[in-house]
């Protein structure tokens, strides 16, 4: 690709992002004005509706970094030995999780799981049938570490707290993208990060995106056309 084409593509992307940014600003303004005030910090959900997309052939399962942290996630680690930096389940303790109820409660309790590579085979055997369907299985993208030094654990926790798992199970993808207490600019930056990441993964780029929707926990969604 020639330098001129590269500059042209960058310009087109910049113009597209500005257009979406303006639409998101309008949508957030309307969402805030239409919503009743609540006594709690509502979550803002992003819904990406897809089209011309065969979920069986083109499913997305990736981790996307976002510029603005939404919350500190509850993280659990499967490690060789206990670590004071994170809630830990050692290999010797795996036998405690033999029944379905205990496993289900564990999956509900934590937002994200990481694992030391040395215990991953045992993690897959013991926890895989519950972590897998929930989309919480540790992965090489973000979650499997070679050693459990405190510095590495802290680095992984930081990345986890500034990331979102994008996992398409049907033609609509939904994820928490912010809190009502966050500034609109921060929410929009997070939405654009997810939007751009999905475009890269989709077989027909933005043609596979029908529209976006945003909503508060207690509100109806507002649609945003991307073209």
Image: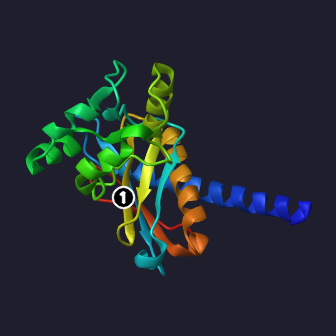
The answer to whether 152 is drawn above or below residue 132 in the figure is: above
Residue at image location 45% in from the left, 69% down from the top: 59
On the rendered structure, is 128 left or right of 68? left
Badge 1: how crowded within 10 Å, few (<14), some, or many (20+)?
A: some
The residue tagged with tag 1: helix, strand or loop?
A: strand
Residue 172 % position (x, y): 37, 68
Colour mapping used in the image: rainbow
Residue 10 % position (x, y): 77, 57
Residue at image location 44% in from the left, 41% down from the top: 143
The residue that label 1 is drawn on is 174
Q: Is there any visible trace of residue 116 in the rendered image? A: no
**Quarter of the rendering occupied by the C terminus:** bottom right
Q: Residue furthest top?
A: 84
Residue 149 % position (x, y): 47, 22
Residue at image location 31% in from the left, 45% down from the top: 123
On the rendered structure, is 190 left or right of 70? right
Which corner quadrant of the image does residue 95 belong to?
Answer: top left
Numbered disc total: 1
The answer to whether 93 is drawn above or below residue 219 in the figure is: above
The answer to whether 82 is drawn above or below residue 109 in the figure is: above
Q: Is there any visible trace of residue 158 in the rendered image? A: yes
Q: Nearer the viewer, residue 28 or 194?
A: 194
Residue 160 % position (x, y): 44, 37
Q: Nearer the viewer, residue 181 or 2?
A: 2
**Quarter of the rendering occupied by the N terminus:** bottom right
């Amino acid at each position: 690709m020639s330098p001129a084409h590269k500059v042209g593509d960058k310009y087109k992307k910049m113009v597209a992002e500005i257009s979406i940014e303006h639409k998101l600003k309008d949508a957030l303004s309307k969402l805030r004005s239409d919503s009743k005030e609540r006594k709690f910090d509502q979550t803002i959900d992003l819904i990406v509706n897809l089209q011309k997309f065969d979920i069986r052939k083109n499913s997305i399962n990736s981790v996307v970094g976002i510029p603005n942290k939404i919350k500190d996630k509850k993280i659990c680690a499967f490690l060789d030995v206990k670590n004071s930096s994170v809630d830990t389940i050692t290999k010797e303790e795996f036998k405690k999780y033999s029944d379905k109820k205990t496993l289900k409660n564990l999956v509900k309790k934590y937002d994200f799981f990481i694992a030391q590579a040395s215990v991953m085979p045992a993690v897959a055997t013991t926890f895989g049938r519950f972590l897998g369907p929930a989309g919480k299985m540790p992965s090489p993208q973000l979650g499997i570490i070679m050693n459990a030094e405190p510095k590495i654990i802290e680095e992984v926790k930081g990345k986890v707290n500034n990331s979102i798992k994008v996992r398409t199970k049907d033609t609509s993808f939904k994820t928490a993208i912010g809190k009502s207490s966050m500034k609109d600019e921060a929410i929009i930056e997070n939405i654009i990060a997810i939007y751009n990441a999905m475009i890269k993964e989709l077989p027909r780029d933005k043609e596979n995106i029908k529209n976006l929707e945003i909503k508060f926990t207690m509100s109806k969604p507002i649609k945003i056309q991307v073209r």
